[in-house]
Every structure is written in structure tokens, then in C-alpha cells.
Image: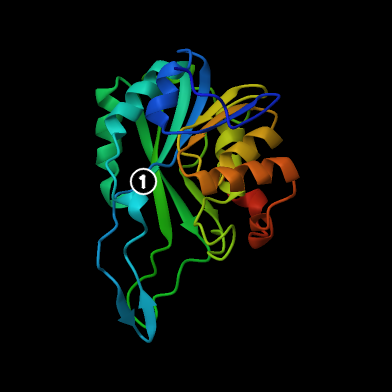
């Protein structure tokens, strides 16, 4: 049975469901760009500890413990992308080979890793080691034909994006990718009225950025709370607070 969208407006469909239940029902070869942010699977149970007087936790929630079929997701990405379509997949930078292999197995072309250099990383709380100021993933295409890559005017793009992360306190404490970050990905990897897919949209930065840039967008998220936050952001249409966190947004991605 087809799943009904939880929210619709011109060019936008938002589903409150698992991607496994939605993507197989979408028509193949209709998506120009995919931006995916799946669970990184790095949580550790019972890992709370005190570090320099601060209580820390490496357990990010049940969602990061539950099974996630990354290989199956890439099979659907391959089916849904148009030839020449592009994809970005965030993941734990220590384990990007998992993404590369899943993409290759699905017949996709993983082109290069990308890295997000956070200008406001979390403090080390007294530990004398470099701050973890990087997050990243893999950027790729439908196939290996570089003549088909649908870059925006301006040619090649750098694979290092620089700018601030969102404050943890925002949007009910749910960590999220900032809108400026995904906006740059969408700007450089798609054109006006192209269709963008986010199969794990969280609180909706991709939905907002794609809509504001004149793209059509389809988003899927299983968490009802996150879906409501994303819908509220779309309905209110206000500029996000995280845009104020980075004053150098225009130079966030070298083009």
C-alpha cells in the first residue's frame, strides 16, 4: 500500500516513514541529487563518564544502535537517480570505506571523500589532543562518466567545506547539519527545478535549503518528532539561527 505524504506543497513531499517503505514506491530515474545522512553506528552503550568535571556520553540514542541497511539504501539510490545524477553521503570519517563499498556494490561511482571543517568544534575539556573538528562522507555519481557530472556553472568544487556547526541547544537539542552546508552541496550539484532526495532528513536542513533554492525535494524520516520540527521550519519559512553562526558563509566552499 502506498504511503501518504505527511506534508505536501508545490515541489515538496515529506514522508514520516522508514526509507525502506517509501523509496521502492518512487518512480526510478527521476532524481537528480541525493543527500543522505544515515546513522554512523558509532554509539557505545553504558559509556557515560566524567571528563574534567563534565559528564560525557558516547551513546547518541537508540536510533544509532538499530540495524541500518546501508547497502539496500544505495541500491535504491542507484535505481532512483537519473544517469549523470550525483550523491553526497555523510558518514563516520574513520569508516568511509563502508560507504564506498556499498556504493560500488550498487553500481554507483564513489568519486572522492569530502570533509566538513567545523570552525567551532566541541572543546576537549582539558584533554591535550587535537580537537575533533572534522566530519565528512563520500561524494559520487550515478556512474564513472565524468562528462555526465551535473556541476553548477563554475566547474570543479573543492572537497573541503569550512564553516560553523549548529549549536547543540537548537531545535530541541537534536544535532543537525547546518543549512549553509547542505545549501552549498545543492547549489553546486544541481540546477533549478531539479529533484533532490533526502532519505533520512532528520530535522530538515536539506528540505529547507532545496526549497529555498528552487529545487523540488522529497524527504523521508521515521522519527515523528523530527518530522514535526522539519514541517514547522518549512511552514514558518524563517531564516535559521544557524545562518547567524557562520559569518563567512559565502566562503564556506571554494568553487
Percent across and percent down for residue 247 are: 68, 60
Instruction: In this rendered view, identify the residue nearer to me: 246 or 212.
Output: 212
Q: Which residue is pictured at 39% across the width and 80% down the height?
A: 125
Q: Which residue is pictured at 43% across the width and 23% down the height?
A: 23
For the question of whether residue 203 can be seen, the reply is yes
**Which quarter of the picture shows residue 8?**
top right
Percent across and percent down for residue 27 are: 48, 13
Q: Which residue lies furthest to the bottom in this view?
A: 53
| Circle 1 residue | 39
The relative height of residue 71 versus residue 64 in the rendered view (above or below) is: above
Label 1 element class:
loop
Instruction: In this rendered view, identify the residue nearer to me: 86 or 178.
Output: 178
Instruction: In this rendered view, identify the residue nearer to me: 192 or 151.
Output: 192
The relative height of residue 22 versus residue 47 in the rendered view (above or below) is: above
Q: Which residue is pictured at 57% across the width and 39% down the height?
A: 206
Instruction: In this rendered view, identify the residue nearer to me: 230 or 137.
Output: 230
**Mark 1: few, some, or many residues within 10 Å (few <14, many ≥20)?**
some
Asked if residue 188 lies left or right of residue 43, the reply is right
Amino acid at each position: 500500500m502506498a504511503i501518504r505524504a505527511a506534508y505536501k506543497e508545490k515541489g515538496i513531499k515529506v514522508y514520516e516513514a522508514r526509507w525502506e517503505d517509501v523509496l521502492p514506491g518512487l518512480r526510478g530515474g527521476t532524481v537528480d541529487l541525493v543527500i543522505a545522512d544515515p546513522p554512523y553506528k558509532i554509539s557505545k552503550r553504558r559509556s557515560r563518564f566524567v571528563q574534567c568535571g563534565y559528564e560525557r556520553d558516547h551513546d547518541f540514542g537508540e536510533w544509532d544502535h538499530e540495524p541500518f541497511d546501508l547497502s539496500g539504501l544505495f541500491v535504491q539510490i542507484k535505481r532512483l537517480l537519473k544517469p549523470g545524477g550525483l550523491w553526497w553521503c555523510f558518514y563516520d570519517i574513520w569508516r568511509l570505506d563502508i560507504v564506498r563499498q556499498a556504493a560500488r556494490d550498487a553500481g554507483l561511482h564513489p568519486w572522492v571523500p569530502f570533509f566538513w571543517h567545523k570552525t567551532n568544534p566541541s572543546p576537549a575539556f582539558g584533554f591535550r589532543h587535537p580537537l575533533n573538528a572534522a566530519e565528512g562522507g563520500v561524494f559520487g555519481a550515478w556512474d564513472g562518466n565524468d562528462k555526465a557530472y551535473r556541476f553548477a556553472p563554475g566547474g570543479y568544487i573543492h572537497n573541503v567545506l569550512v564553516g560553523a556547526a549548529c549549536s547543540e541547544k537548537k531545535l530541541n537539542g537534536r544535532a543537525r547539519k547546518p543549512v549553509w552546508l547542505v545549501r552549498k552541496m545543492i547549489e553546486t550539484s544541481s540546477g533549478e527545478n531539479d529533484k533532490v532526495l533526502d532519505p533520512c532528513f532528520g530535522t530538515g536542513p536539506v528540505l529547507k535549503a532545496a526549497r529555498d533554492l528552487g529545487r523540488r525535494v522529497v524527504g523521508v524520516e521515521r522519527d515523528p518528532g523530527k518530522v514535526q520540527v522539519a514541517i514547522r521550519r518549512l511552514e514558518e519559512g524563517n531564516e535559521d539561527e544557524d545562518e547567524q553562526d557562520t559569518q563567512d558563509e559565502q566562503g564556506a566552499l571554494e568553487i
